[in-house]
Image: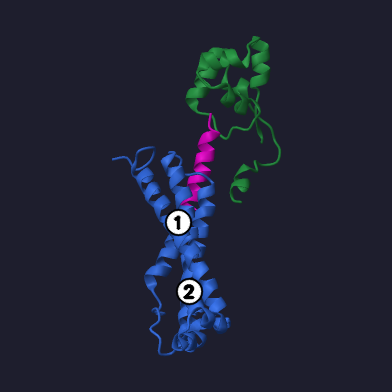
Chain colours: A blue, B green
Amino acid sequence: MRALGPGSVSSFLKIILDVIYVGLWIFVSLLSLFTLVALLFSFNPELLASLLPISDAVEAISRDGPLFAGALAAWALLLGGWMVIVERLRKIFATLTAGDPFHPDNVVRLRLIGLVLAGLEVGRYVFSGMARWLAPKAKVIDDSFTLTAWFSVLVVFVLAEVFREGARLRREAELTI
Amino acid sequence: MPVRVNLDRVLLDRRMSLTELSDRVGVTIANLSILKTGKARAVRFSTLDALCRELQCQPGDLLTFEYGPADSHDEDDED
């Protein structure tokens, strides 16, 4: 089983990444739309009251609406970050499928993936901290320090340097007559 | 670059075109152009062997060393 080139494992993974990317794109779009709707209703409870004649629901939404909209926005940002990662991975895997793993652009792509991973991890701490502060009773995501995540970030940065060296060697090979 | 490639001059002396040399040594015209314009980083012994054989010359006829500023290619790579 070949790892690189057309019809290889890379091309199979590229197809999977394409599907995930489209799924994420749809999900993030819907989430952003729901966030906007939640924001609209939380700041205009009268609008909801005119649409739904349920006073309890209106009261609950006017009380928890901004928090709910904030949580939706946080999830949209988180998934947006994952979308950036998947999009860069798709481009990396496209170069692998073409049989050109040490394309110079892959260095920048890997560095960006590392930065976004680090950003997502920091964002997780920030959002879960804010959630604990704003809604102490709510069940929030775990904000504990995860060694695996930071280890992954470091591995991605090291891989970026490996690819940089590979790109340099490729250029050397190209200019060796 | 302190090492100069004199392929142009040798070709002129032998009245041979780059295309003809390319056919004889089995190196593409694009690669020979890289070599001729001094953009090459390295030359394989096999290429040098083929060039000397077809041009009936010595490696020293093709390559000369000139004192001057050091090559900046490696510094470019660090960017």
Q: Label 2's element? A: helix
Badge 2 sits on which subunit? A
A154 over A21 or under it: above or below: below
Q: Secondary structure at mark 1?
A: helix
Count neighbours of disc 1 (C-alpha within 10 A) and say few if under 14, some if 14 to 19, many if 20 or more. many
Q: Is residue B44 above or below residue A172?
A: above
Which one is in front, B30 or B69? B30
> Where residue B25 appears, x then y in whole percent?
51, 17
Residue at the (52%, 59%) spot, across then down: A112
What x and y, as percent, mark residue A141? 40, 78
What distance separates the C-alpha of mark 2 from that of mark 1?
A: 21 Å
B16 vs A2, left or right, is: right
Which label sits on residue A86? 1
Q: Looking at the image, is A19 positioned above or below residue A144?
A: above
Q: Amino acid at mark 2?
A: Leu
Q: Please name the residue shown 65% across and 43% down the image.
A: B72
Residue placed most toward the observer, B35 or A160: A160
Count neighbours of disc 2 (C-alpha within 10 A) and say few if under 14, some if 14 to 19, many if 20 or more: many
**Image location of residue A133, percent across then percent down:** 48, 88
Q: Residue at x 41, y 41 (%)?
A: A97
Q: Nearer the viewer, mark 2 or mark 1?
A: 2
User: What residue span does the magenta drawing correspond to?
Assistant: A158-177
Q: Which residue is mark 2?
A: A72
Asked whether residue B26 is in view, the answer is yes
Q: Quadrant of residue A9?
A: top left
